[in-house]
Amino acid sequence: MADVTDVTGVADAVGLTGVSGVSGVPVNGPTALASEYFQSYSVIGLLALIGVLFVAVAFGAGRLLRPVVPTPEKLLTYECGVDPVGEGWAHTQVRYYVYAFLYVIFAVDSIFLFPWATVFAAPGYGATTLVEMFIFLGFLAVGLLYAWKKGVLAWA
């Protein structure tokens, strides 16, 4: 059977101070930790509230201070500096989107390659990391080969 000194020693070891010897209920241990925990979140909440208020005040001041002079030119639909004439449907080249997707693929590839290079240099990660990265590069190579076979990479 453990005596009171054992309980107090264990409580001190885990950082709970002020343990009463009779009931074993901490006096200021977990409650002090909880109040510190929620106090740090209250600071974050206060900063978030200040940020929201700052944005609301800025938008409100802009709405109050700006001039409101609606003219027919201001009420027109604006599209990249070109007057909206004709019908709304226009043919769009899909290949530009494909180039954008290929760029995203290689950007993601570079995002994974740089951390891999740092992990590969660490001891114990050599062969496994090398195989995993070549599998990843293989998937990217298959996608690039598919795009090349479909003629997407030919600028016509």
Image (cartoon, rainbow, N blue to C red):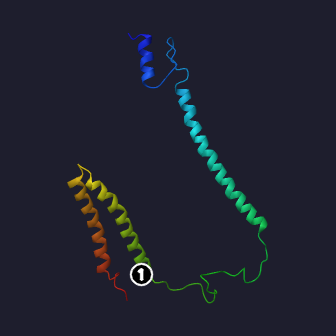
- Looking at the picture, tell me which residue is in the foreground, 76 or 110: 110
Q: Could you tell me residue 97's position as x and y percent?
A: 44, 77
Which element carries disc 1, helix, strand or loop? Answer: helix
Name the quadrant containing residue 70: bottom right
Residue 51 position within the rendered picture, expressed as x and y whole percent measured from the top left = 64, 53
Disc 1 target residue: 95
Res. 3 image quadrant: top left
Position of 120 with respect to 23 (left or right) is left
Q: Position of residue 150 (x, y in %)?
A: 32, 80
Vertical placement of 96 versus 27: above or below? below
The residue located at (28%, 70%) in the rendering is 141
Foreground pick, 144 / 33: 33
Amino acid type assigned to the residue bearing label 1 in the image: Arg
What residue is drawn where x is 42% and y is 23%? 13
Label 1: how many residues lie within 10 Å, few (<14), some (14-19) or many (20+)? some
- In the rendered image, the quadrant that contains the N terminus is top left
- Quadrant of the rendering where the C terminus is positioned: bottom left
Picture residue at 78% right of the left edge, 67% below the top: 65
Residue located at (69% from left, 53% from top): 53
Q: From this view, report whether residue 34 is shown above or below residue 142.
A: above
Q: Nearer the viewer, residue 121 or 102?
A: 121
Q: Report the side of 75 relative to 31 (left or right).
A: right
Q: Is residue 136 above or below residue 90?
A: above
Q: Count the marks: how many?
A: 1
Where residue 91 sits: x, y (%)?
Answer: 50, 86
